[in-house]
Image: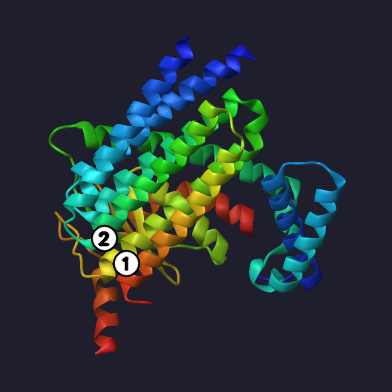
Amino acid sequence: MQTVSLLNRFIYTWVILFILWYAFTTSLEPAELITGGFVSLVVASFSYKVFTGSGLKIFMPHKLFFVAQYIFIFILALIKSNFDVARRVLSPSLPINPGIVEFNTKLTNDFAKMVLANSITLTPGTLTIDIVENTFYIHWIDVKSDNPEIAHTEIANNFEKLLLKIFN
Amino acid sequence: MELNYLYITVLVILSIAFIIGMLRFIKGPTASDRVVALDTISIIATASLVFMGYIFNRYIYLDVALIYGVLGFIGVIIIARYLEGAL
Amino acid sequence: MEILKYIGIGLVLLGSIFLLLGAVGIYRMPDVYNRLQAGTKATTLGAMSLILGVGFMEPEWLVKTLILVIFIGIANPLSSHVLARSAYKNNQMPIIKNGIDAYKKINDSEKSEEN
């Protein structure tokens, strides 16, 4: 992960915290906004070193386009996984064939790994159990193969391609 | 007053979900199973708080639901870390 | 604005049905990991869609409900991931049909280091 300047990271933290402040208060009164700006400035000055490593890059337009595409794919997968769960839960014989598989990821950014783990948990039939460095351990409700390559293409490929574009 | 039927339907479905989760909570058999049931119940409670806010037309219920969700999340994580032996 | 209201009613009904489905999944599945699988997915989409439905029915609340939806989408998978790991470290062996358990070796090596 290439490092970016401290000022860049500080401004990124400030902007994100201020957006959060606005979202929690949802009021446009000047007093609220000034207080929010001040409070997020103070909190950002304490926490910007642990808050982010990649800085403002993510606000560039073509990355925002990939973020929108990611969210779209993710919501489709979430709906599909719910119908999968419905089918398994409601059928009287409980069609499950569980096992735990592993695969390696190409992602290096910690935040990207967290997003990938959360997405895997919410896609059909898979649940992230642990991440050790670059290896994901996945509980798979319907195991197709214990080969890491096949598990990788079956479970994570779509998400990982987009995340590589967003975070690198 | 078709909307009243909506309130009753949704609240009955949520209560049944709550009771089924509670059955799993009582049955057990291990601590991990109980925490899983607790997690599910707290999410159902968050959703029903939001819906009750709509019924009573009180905006403040959304803040209550948010705080309830955050506290449930932190509680589940602390219990899980304890079971893991990390605390 | 009538149409938004009907979309909201549909989302609320769908959400409550998925929440019920999550609870049934918690009850019927045979071990912790499968319960987490069914419980997390169904309750996440159920809560998201119910809360978003309320947001559609009361358009002034939309921003706050979106915050709740995003929070649930981030927090719920995280807590299920922590729970799955703690169950495994707490010696709850999953039901495995084919003998595929790649995580066992990591867990065993950690234990032998402690002893």
Return the x and y of residue A105 as percentages of the image width and height: 45, 62
Image vertical order of residue A106 relative to residue C4, above or below: below
Does the image show residue C74? Answer: no
- Marks 1/2: CA–CA distance: 8 Å
- Quick one: B5 or C65, which is closer to the camera? B5
Left or right of A142 in this view: B87:
right
Badge 2 element: helix
Sort mark 2 into few (<14), some (14-19) or many (20+) by Cα contacts within 10 Å: many
Residues at circles 1 and 2 in contact by the CB criterion of under 8 Å: yes
Sort mark 1 into few (<14), some (14-19) or many (20+) by Cα contacts within 10 Å: many
Task: Using the rendered view, name the quadrant where residue A124 is placed.
Answer: top left
Q: Which mark is residue B32?
A: 2
- Quick one: B5 or A41, which is closer to the camera? B5
Nearer the camera: disc 1 or disc 2: 2
Return the x and y of residue C85 as percentages of the image width and height: 33, 65
At x 17%, y 51%, the residue is B27
Does the image show residue A55? Answer: yes
Q: Amino acid at mark 1?
A: Ser
* Quadrant including the C terminus of chain C: bottom left
Dot 1 falls on which chain? C
Return the x and y of residue C45 as percentages of the image width and height: 43, 38
Q: Which mark is residue A42?
A: none
Left or right of A29 in this view: A21:
left
At x 51%, y 26%, the residue is B55
Dot 2 falls on which chain? B
Q: Which residue is under mark 1?
A: C86
Task: Using the rendered view, name the quadrant where residue C38 is placed.
Answer: top left
Q: Which residue is at the far bottom?
A: C115
Q: How many marks?
A: 2
Q: Which residue is at the far top?
A: B1
- Quick one: A145 or A49, which is closer to the camera? A49
Image vertical order of residue B85 relative to residue A65, above or below: below
